[in-house]
């Protein structure tokens, strides 16, 4: 193993740890943080010493893409070392229990917080906080991680939840990708999936109605 890239320590699954991934995660996190800071500051087109700093910062949302790539790599890393251990059913169950409980608790908090706030406001003889009722479609789509497939639910309940919908797409496609790798090899699979991804990104702006553009953009493809 190369020092600093592959560690001599191992994960619970028995695969070598990769300390460099923590650095890449930190870079992705900082890119997303800086992008949102620039966005909420007004998306200024700053130019410093002739350098278009604002234009550069406008592309820092690619930190999300880096997170998705790292997620895919981390999913494949243990399978690469122990392919015989991968069982789709057990794998999906582990993914669900790792993400869903905290996610569902956060949804419950977001739904109940305005109700509790209004109770408090009533006790203080203050006007209630206007809060739109949660629709059945919003609740079901978020509980099933399918909210990223429709423009009205993509940023519903809580805007940041869109990323979990995209992550769920990755989890669904991952076992399929493994089947393709086992049958056709990794190079053919990567080539085919890259071709599909490029075609999707070139076509969705014209194929999808304008109100659906965010759905096309926030896709794991």
Image (cartoon, grey):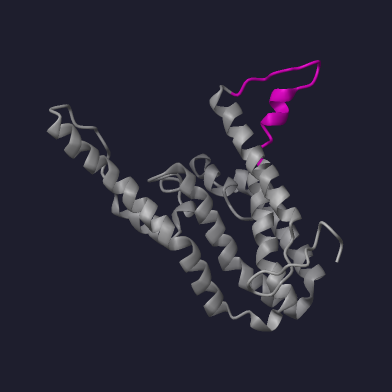
The reply to whether residue 116 is visible in this rendering is yes
In this rendering, would 131 be left or right of 36? left
In this rendering, would 218 be left or right of 202? left
Counting from the top left corner in percent of width and height, residue 204 is at 61, 48
Look at the image and tell me in which quarter the N terminus lies.
bottom right
Look at 37% across and 46% down and name the residue there: 157
Toward which corner of the image does residue 105 lie, by quadrant? bottom left
Question: Can you say whether 207 is above or below 91 in the image?
Answer: above
Look at the image and tell me in which quarter the C terminus lies.
bottom right
Toward which corner of the image does residue 145 lie, by quadrant? bottom left
In this rendering, would 163 be left or right of 155? right
In this rendering, would 209 be left or right of 103? right
Look at 76% across and 17% down and name the residue there: 48
Q: Identify the residue at the far right of this view.
A: 2
Q: Which residues are magenta?
A: 43-61
Nearer-the-camera pick, 213 or 20? 20
Counting from the top left corner in percent of width and height, residue 186 is at 78, 71
Magenta span contains residue 2: no
Question: Can you say whether 67 is above or below 175 in the image?
Answer: above
Counting from the top left corner in percent of width and height, residue 75 is at 65, 66
Q: Identify the residue at the far top of this view.
A: 49
Question: Can you say whether 68 is above or below 41 in the image?
Answer: below
Look at 57% across and 48% down and name the residue there: 218
Nearer-the-camera pick, 71 or 24? 24
Q: Main secondary structure of the magenta part?
A: loop
Question: Can you say whether 194 is above or below 45 in the image?
Answer: below
Nearer-the-camera pick, 183 or 110? 110
Q: Identify the residue at the far bottom of this view.
A: 84
The reply to whether residue 134 is visible in this rendering is no
Counting from the top left corner in percent of width and height, residue 127 is at 17, 27
């Amino acid at each position: 193993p190369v020092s600093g890239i592959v560690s001599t320590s191992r994960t619970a699954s028995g695969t070598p740890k990769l300390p460099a991934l923590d650095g890449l995660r930190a870079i992705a996190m900082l890119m997303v943080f800086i992008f949102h800071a620039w966005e909420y500051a007004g998306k200024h087109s700053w130019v410093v010493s002739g350098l278009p700093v604002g234009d550069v910062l406008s592309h820092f949302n690619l930190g999300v893409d880096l997170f998705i790539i790292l997620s895919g790599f981390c999913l494949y890393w243990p399978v690469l070392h122990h392919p015989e251990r991968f069982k789709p059913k057990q794998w999906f169950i582990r993914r669900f229990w790792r993400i869903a409980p905290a996610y569902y608790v956060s949804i419950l908090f977001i739904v109940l917080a305005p109700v509790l706030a209004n109770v408090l406001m009533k006790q203080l003889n203050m006007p209630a906080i206007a809060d739109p009722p949660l629709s059945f479609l919003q609740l079901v789509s978020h509980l099933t991680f399918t909210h990223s497939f429709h423009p009205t639910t993509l940023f519903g309940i809580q805007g940041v939840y869109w990323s979990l919908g995209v992550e769920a797409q990755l989890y669904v496609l991952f076992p399929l990708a493994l089947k393709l790798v086992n049958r056709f090899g990794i190079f053919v699979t990567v080539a085919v999936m890259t071709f599909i991804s490029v075609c999707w990104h070139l076509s969705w702006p014209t194929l999808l109605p304008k109100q659906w553009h965010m759905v096309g953009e926030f896709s794991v493809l």
